[in-house]
Image (spheres, rainbow, N blue to C red):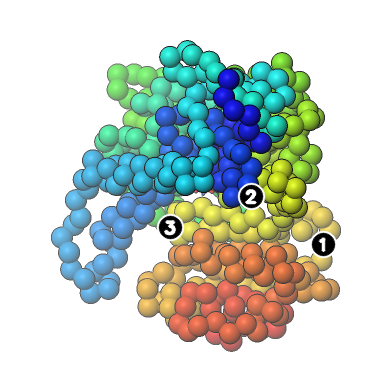
Amino acid sequence: MADAYDVVVIGSGPGGYVCAIKAAQLGLKTAVVEKRETFGGTCLNIGCIPSKALLHASELFEEAGHDFASLGIKVNKPKLDLKAMMGHKDKTVEANVNGVAFLFKKNKIDSFIGTGRIAAPGKVDVTNGSGETQTIEAKNIVIATGSDSAALPGIDIDEKTVVTSTGALELNSVPEKMIVVGAGVIGLEMGSVWRRLGSEVTVVEFLDRVLPGMDGDVGKQFQRMLTKQGMTFKLSSKVTGVNKEGNRLKVSVEPANGGETDTLEADIVLVAIGRKPYTDGLGLAEAGVALDDKGRVKTDAHFKTNVDGIYAIGDVIAGPMLAHKAEDEGMAIAEILAGDVGHVNYNVIPNVVYTYPEVASVGKTEEELKEAGVEYVVGKFPFMANGRARAMLHTDGFVKILADKKTDRVLGGHIVGFGAGDMIHEIAVLMEFGGSSEDLGRTCHAHPTLSEAVREAGLATFAKPIHM
Ligand code: FAD
Ligand code: NAI
């Protein structure tokens, strides 16, 4: 039996590894159990990091092929070396997962590679690849086992031709035709990668819009932009079957509410219809840990489950399935376990789609404010009217600020545009401090920057923009 720990974390994704590091920094004796050979979870191994490596490389590939000439740069048509691009992605993943291993050592965190199962409160059995089991004792257990891709009933995923995001990150040739099921974040990010590299991409979405959950204005404009880039959308539609005929796939698509079936052809079908919490093999039922109606581990506001000494964070509990949400919960629970105050402000969690242009949001959408009966004012500013955006040929998109009509407090910010994922954070900081659109509009912004568009949207909310 290994030494007793103050905390053992099951899962080393952004929730688990951040929790472990913070706990160790706060003086807790900490261990991590991870069933993958490498640390970093979905995010570092098969999620955020590899997808962003491919998004960046494919964006430059497209830019070199289309936009350089307008900037006075003559180059021959760029040639794709997919193997080298995948190599860049793999090296990026390797550096990141090794970074987590280094941080575990640096912070004197013990790690156990194997599947963790809660044998009882305070006891975790770890079974390694050879089937050997050892028991770790800990005062506290933190479940950070993340999530897995949701399956489409009746459709077999082989990760070769019918793939989830994991297979879509590993294709060894550019498919001629790709059908993406689901116009959410994964569908639009991975669909963008393969369209830029040469695929004809059709996105089939159940709802009548892309990116549900994002502001409606943003969704509409963004769909137009992606369509202009060459992506095809079949909204209010569902995929009901995929049949293999030789090396082609015949995909049956029906209107969402039923009706005539259309058959589309594809080389690759990417199923991206959401993710589900991952609790397989954890022994939760035997340990008496309650789940909610969506199969997520049920916790209170302090991440505690219904069983004393057992906590949960990240994708496996309620809330947005985002790496930074998991990280913040990891820090908060470590602080709570160390006797400090740990807290996550769920009203200010940025959300970024890393396409071209990027889409970023924080706080409420217009639809949410309407539904809650909150009176609000809107300020908008287009990148077309921003000098730096014109100089860079990145004029697509806009910034939109939503503020309370009476108090002017900023309730939401939405940006579609180049660099949106970085710019969103000034709105997030503003909201953390309870700032108003006037605070934003009166803050001096360096010229010429894309961020001036954020300031102008602030001005447009409480007064008038200058450059429009
Ligand atoms: P995970 O990262 O899923 O980690 C859980 C870990 O637990 C895994 O390593 C798993 O092997 C391990 N585990 C599970 N069960 C056991 C067990 N019984 N014993 C031992 N170990 C176990 N989010 C963003 O914020 N930005 C992005 O750009 C982004 N891009 C994404 C792209 C893709 C393609 C995907 C799929 C996801 C993306 N996400 C992104 C979501 C992000 O990856 C998740 O929100 C995040 O990884 C959740 O962290 P977590 O720590 O809760 O769980
Ligand atoms: P998602 O929830 O973002 O989108 C799924 C889409 O599929 C929705 O639009 C939904 O209406 C649609 N859908 C559901 N069932 C369908 C069906 N049968 N037929 C057609 N459409 C259907 O889920 P996605 O894209 O799989 O991503 C999962 C999660 O991973 C995201 O919610 C996000 O939390 C995380 N993620 C975050 C990223 C980021 O922050 N940039 C990038 C990738 C993933």
The label shown at residue 187 is none
Q: Is residue 288 above or below residue 26?
A: above
Which comes sooner in the sequence, label 2 or label 1?
2
The label shown at residue 356 is 3
Say which element carries label 2: loop
- Does the image show residue 129? yes
Please tell me which residue lies in front, 115 or 83: 115
Residue found 53% across the figure and 58% down from its top: 359
**Callout 3: few (<14), some (14-19), or many (20+) C-alpha neighbours within 10 Å?**
many
Mark 2 → mark 1, Cα distance in angstroms: 41 Å
Say which element carries label 3: loop
Please report contact status of discs 2 and 1: CB closer than 8 Å, yes or no. no
Which of discs 2 and 3 lies nearer the camera? The answer is: 2
Mark 3 → mark 1, Cα distance in angstroms: 32 Å
Q: Amino acid at mark 3?
A: Tyr
- Does the image show residue 264? no
Provide residue 215's location: percent of width, then percent of height.
Answer: 64, 56
**Callout 1: few (<14), some (14-19), or many (20+) C-alpha neighbours within 10 Å?**
some
Residue found 30% across the figure and 19% down from its top: 246
Please report contact status of discs 3 and 1: CB closer than 8 Å, yes or no. no
Say which element carries label 1: loop
Left or right: 326 in relation to 56: right
**Callout 2: few (<14), some (14-19), or many (20+) C-alpha neighbours within 10 Å?**
some
Mark 2 → mark 3, Cα distance in angstroms: 40 Å
Provide residue 223's location: percent of width, then percent of height.
Answer: 51, 53
Which comes sooner in the sequence, label 3 or label 1?
3
Tell me the residue that label 1 is attached to. Answer: 374
